[in-house]
Amino acid sequence: MAIDQAPYCVVRFGTIEKAVRWSQNRLNLRDWVIDIYYGEQVPLWANPKSSLSGQSETDFSHMRAKVWINPEGCKVADYHPVAVAIHEVLHIFFHNYDIVEHDERMINTMEEILFKQWQAEKRR
């Protein structure tokens, strides 16, 4: 996650859904269908040995993706669930543009910028 990572707070599924749709729009991923999983149970498609805060999976041939946000994992790691959701959509963004070998630092930097925009727009 980003260096200036937003701390954990309780977030409802509806907020995660709005954040994913907002990120899709911001990153011009409107043609993608993104299924959102929110909860502690690791989905069958996710890697239980990878991040337990959130994960994503992309299917380029059908322009579909899955995003899983684990609120308990976010709490343990002290990550804001919306920031994690934005982070996972950024993975989809990089894969969409065939930047498979991207640096995690790039995503962390963009996550921080987008999360701050999300917060500023939410305050309006």
Image (cartoon, rainbow, N blue to C red):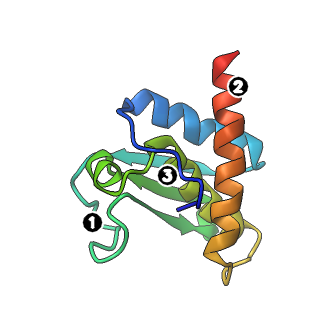
Q: Amino acid at mark 1?
A: Leu
Q: Closer to the N terminus: mark 1 or mark 3? A: 1
Task: Report the residue marked by disc 2.
Answer: 121
Label 1 and label 2: CA atoms lie apart by: 34 Å
Task: Report the residue marked by disc 3.
Answer: 84
What is the residue that sits farthest to the bottom in this orientation?
Answer: 101
Choose top left, top right, bottom left or bottom right for residue 92: bottom right
Q: Give the x, y percent position of residue 110.
A: 71, 57
Asked which secondary structure carries label 3, the reply is: helix
Q: Give the x, y percent position of residue 84.
A: 49, 52
- Mark 3 neighbour density, 10 Å: few (under 14) some (14–19) many (20 or more): many
- How many numbered marks, from 0 up? 3
- Seen at 39% across and 32% down, the residue is 11
Q: Amino acid at mark 2?
A: Glu
Question: Is residue 14 or residue 9 the one in the foreground?
Answer: 9
Q: What is the number of the mark on residue 44?
A: 1
Q: Nearer the viewer's eye, disc 1 or disc 3?
A: 3
* Mark 3–mark 2 CB contact (< 8 Å): no
Q: Amino acid at mark 3?
A: Val
